Amino acid sequence: MTSRTLTDLDIKHLKPRASQYEVFDPSTRGLAIRVSPGGTKAFVFLYRIGRHPRRYTIGRYPVVSLKSARQWTSEALKLVAAGKDPQARKLLERERYRSSLFPATATAFIEKYAKPNTKAWNETERILEREFCPRWKSMHLHDISKHHIAEALDELVVQNGPSAANHAFAALRRLFNWCVERGELGISPCAGLKQPAQTYSRERVLTNEEVARIWKAAHSIGYPFGSLIKLLLLTGQRRSEVSRLCWVDIDLDTGLWTQPSLSNKSKRVHLVPLTSHAVEVLQEIPCLNDQLVFPARGRSNKAVSGFSKWKRRLDKLSGTKNWTIHDIRRTVNTGLAALKVPPHVADHILNHKGSVRSSVAAIYDRHDYLDEKRDALQRWAAHIDLLTNMEC
């Protein structure tokens, strides 16, 4: 341990050694200049809280001058005399700094808002973590401007397509609105920005030949994505509902899938008849999770994801292009109509508000049409059977 009254000239002439060393300034108790083997010089403050020694790095020389280091140490000594740890203030400031970075804000948004209030929180989490957290990992919430958001969305349109960019913008807008509501921001940087791409109502319906090719490609892929696609084709339900399907909600003996009100878009209990073909698909699925039929890799309690990757493989195997997974639902609806299934029965199968019934009729008509739905889906399964010989 070396000690001598320090001057700026002394500090400038300190040479690096093979190992780090410190020179103390006797005029200011606890203050030292630390010299690293690489030649970096920094002021440090050594002190005790009770019996515990502490070390606080004040800052590098000459960014922090000798005069400033002595003034800071004098103030810190007063805190130590009062039993307060100067390091606590530094740790608090560091924690505030980290908590205001975008990734930390995104995590807080998912945990405090998205999980308790939205069904598709895992999709929102995936979008934020994949598209925005790496890009803005070192940026504070207040530093993200309209320009940063517009630039990111423009790249997403090119890389992932208009629809993906629109979904990403929606997730980001919800996050910033949440921050405004909590008082963390005065105004959202998304305010005044339009969604990056114009949306149009899709009309794509798969042809019989495409349905056959997709079914056979799904059979080739197998579990999990192939099985999921088969169930979508056989039931006409939404991708989110099938991907989050729980074992407890299905009865293979009676052939019935009961969707709880919180697990579907309509917010009501929905009964989906399972045809013998759908039951066979489910029976072949391995039980890798006590809760989920399609758990994410690693047997976690998160539902399967990575649909874009599997969809590209399905397109390649089936030779089918320019379609989305949601087009299956429209295809099932169209196919049921071609099989002369009454529109209100098809509406009940797809679990959306019927277009043929008045609002008053919808209120008083509580019949679940279970038998009619089962008959319709059996006819639809038979139609797929004719197209594909039902390879299961």
Image (spheres, rainbow, N blue to C red):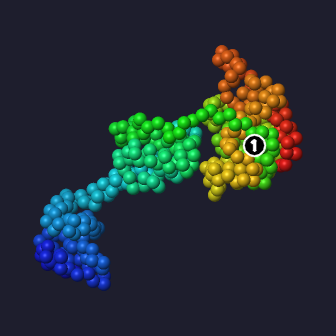
How many numbered marks, from 0 up? 1
**Frontmost residue, 243 versus 314:** 314
Position of 164 with respect to 222 (left or right) is: left
Image check: 20 left or right of 316?
A: left
195 to the left or right of 353: left
- In the rendered structure, the answer to whether residue 90 lies left or right of residue 248 reads left
Location of residue 27 in the rendering, given as x and y in whole percent from the top left corner: 11, 71
Q: Position of residue 91 (x, y in %)?
A: 32, 58
Q: Residue at x 47, y 43 (%)?
A: 172
Could you tell me which residue is drawn at 39 percent across and 41 percent down?
A: 189
Quick check: can you spot residue 356? yes
Q: Decide: few, some or many residues near mark 1? Use Cα within 10 Å; few <14, some 14-19, many ≥20.
A: many
**What amino acid does circle 1 point to?**
Leu
Residue 178 visible, this orientation: no
- Which residue does the image show at 71% across and 34% down from the upper left? 330
Which residue lies at the image location 25% right of the left edge and 65% below the top edge? Answer: 59
> Picture coordinates of residue 211 (x, y %)?
78, 42
369 shown above or below 96: above
Q: Which residue is mark 1?
A: 231
Point out the image quarter for the N terminus.
Answer: bottom left
x then y, percent, for residue 277: 83, 42
Residue 265, located in which quarter of the rendered image?
Answer: top right
Residue furthest bottom as drawn? 18
Question: Between 319 and 120, which is closer to the camera in this rendering?
Answer: 319
Please state which of residues 172 and 304 is positioned toward the viewer in this rendering: 172
SS at badge 1? helix
